[in-house]
Amino acid sequence: MTARAPAKWGLRTLAFGYLGLLLLAPVGLIFWKTFEHGLGPPIDAMTSPDALHAIWLTLLMVAVAVPLNTVFGVGCALLLVRYKWKGNAVIDGIINLPFAISPIVIGLSLFLLYGNAGWFGPTLSEWGIKVLFSTPGMILASIFVSLPFVVREVVPVLQEIGTEQEQAASTLGANAWQTFWRITLPAIRWGVAYGVVLTTARVLGEFGAVTIVSGLISGQTETLPLFVAKSFEQFNEQAAYAGAIVLALLALTTLLLMSVGGRKAKASGPIPIAGDTTISMSNAKEGS
Amino acid sequence: MGIAVEGARKRFGDFQALDDVSIDVPDGSLTALLGPSGSGKSTLLRAIAGLENLDAGQVVINGQDATKTPAQKREVGFVFQHYAAFKHMTVFGNVAFGLKIRKWDKPQIGDRVHELLRLVQLDGLAERYPDQLSGGQRQRMALARALAVQPQVLLLDEPFGALDAKVRKDLRTWLRRLHDEMHVTTIFVTHDQEEAMDVAGQLVVMNEGRVEQSGSADDLYDHPANEFVMSFVGEVNRLGEHFVRPHDMEVVLDADERTEEAMVQRIVALGFEIRVEFVLGDGTEVWAQLTRAELQKLELREGQIVHLRPGQLKSFSGDVPSSGDHGASTPRDGQDDDDAEVTAAA
């Protein structure tokens, strides 16, 4: 069942053409536009106070939302897979909500909850806590939209590895905590890593939900995507392109970190050697 | 001392896995839990290890009630059918796991692990990963891992079930020798009666969540308590209310008052053993196990009318298990292909 050469090359051309036209060309154009007049203008655009604040705020949101969603995601996946319960179907459905609901709607719902006329808004503002139009609200929105990724990546991996290794660890004296750190987590590390990358990418790029709750205050509640959008609307194309490039570079860095981390993990993981798995069993007969 | 289970019960939904099971395993013995799939033997083993909680009953390990003790504190070595190798660790890391949990010093761990790897003949493979080992090697690694922490008891759940016939035979010989050296109380689960008889000193035959009989291999073979045990620990023919082993079927050419007329249906040569299948006047199918010499002397051929004189007839009036499908009047069906193969090679 080997594909014939024309079909193979046809498919390859199609794949590259499709990707090139839809992804590479536009992104490449942005690069070209940004550095059209050398490195100076984009650097100037990104070192303005508003731009620097936008970068800092974006990184802050990643730093808070990603660890929280990772811990929650792994815990939730363990709950769904390892502790069978009827309520799990409900939890499973709720976790998928952020995938199903438009980010704008998520932003609006936060607005309803934390606004001055919302459920929590008045109480919280009495305590002096400002959620809307400030960082907490934007972090909440980011957590909301990026919540399912780690769970969805880890659940199938947990199902696949099964429970025997964990049971073996417990018969060897490991408690639940030791079993998790030494057996379960190393076994699901790829699922977790992939989930973290997806979560990070989503938090970096989130626009819809964050727009609603941010109030778009330059230098205060403006993340990089909002900064790019604002600059574009104000015909400050140089800043828009430069901001887009920074976003792309941040996402690339995440991917790079994962593959470097992955390679390290691989160096301490199994490297199958072909044809080397049949050391004769006959020596078992010789007894000991 | 040893292991004792009293009145163990376990239900999974509608399925009664263990129904009032009591067993007594002497200290330092090598005992087989033998039974068909679904007989509850694995559940019983897992309950002894603490991997399964009993609905009722008691588990006593070396005189201590362990019923409520979690698996991690029972100090049992457990070997799984599919090895349960820690895939992200080397062979060394796997064997060292229990010692690291117990916070042994590094040099001590190194000494102990290499001692065990020598014992299971994997010493040169310490830096390999489980993926790079054969099935038999992985199972020996799992055994070394279980033995590293000097468990009070060693429990093996169908340890050779996933291996091919040859490796399996080698490993069980090797397990028996290992037990002779270590004297750790060992229970292993199998559905293969030949394996159980080959390896274990004591057998516990289970069926439908109950213990049918326990004793030595000779006991069970010569004095089976019921029809199930008789048909499970060896081949059997059914003649009305009576049972007889195929090697106790004497084939004669002349009739007398103790013989029954039969027609030779098929003659199958299985190496040294010859298996001759007959059909009786009432349609019952039986078979006899003959040697090559006996066959040549009788000069049997298919379609011939001969006379059978069954010896060692057994009957179990009123003591027959409810499930009727084990009253084999034809050679017993193997549990699976491996089983059939082993039986045929016997």
Image: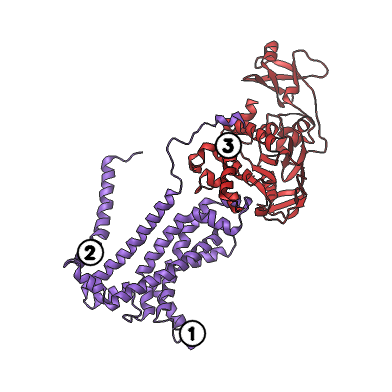
Chain colours: A purple, B red
Quadrant of the image occupied by residue A47: bottom left
Mark 3 against mark 2, which lies toward the viewer? Answer: 3
Label 1 sits on a secondary structure element that is helix
Q: Disc 1 marks which residue? A: A124
Residue A42 pos. (x, y %): 22, 70
Q: CA distance from mark 3 to mark 2?
A: 61 Å
Q: Chain of mark 3?
A: B
Residue under the point 65% across and 29% down:
B343
Instruction: Name the residue carrying label 3.
Output: B118
10 Å neighbourhood of mark 2: few (<14), some, or many (≥20)?
some
**Residue at image coords 67%, 50%:** B75
Pointers 2 and 1 in contact (C-beta within 8 Å):
no
Tell me where residue A186 appears, x and y as whole percent: 49, 54
- In this view of the protein, which residue sits in the foreground, A166 or B282? A166
Q: Residue furthest front?
A: B107
Three-letter code for the amino acid on which mark 1 is drawn: Leu
Mark 3: few/some/many CA within 10 Å (<14, 14-19, 20+): some
Mark positioned earlier in the residue sequence (2 or 1): 2
Q: Quadrant of residue B239?
A: top right
Quadrant for the N terminus of chain A, please.
top left
Dot 2 and dot 1 within a common chain: yes
Residue A31, numbered circle? 2
- In the rendered structure, which amino acid carries the disc numbered 2? Phe
Relative to B317, A36 lies left or right: left
Classify mark 2: helix, strand or loop. Answer: helix
Amino acid at the residue labelled 3: Arg
Horizontally, residue A188 falls left or right of residue B273, namely: left
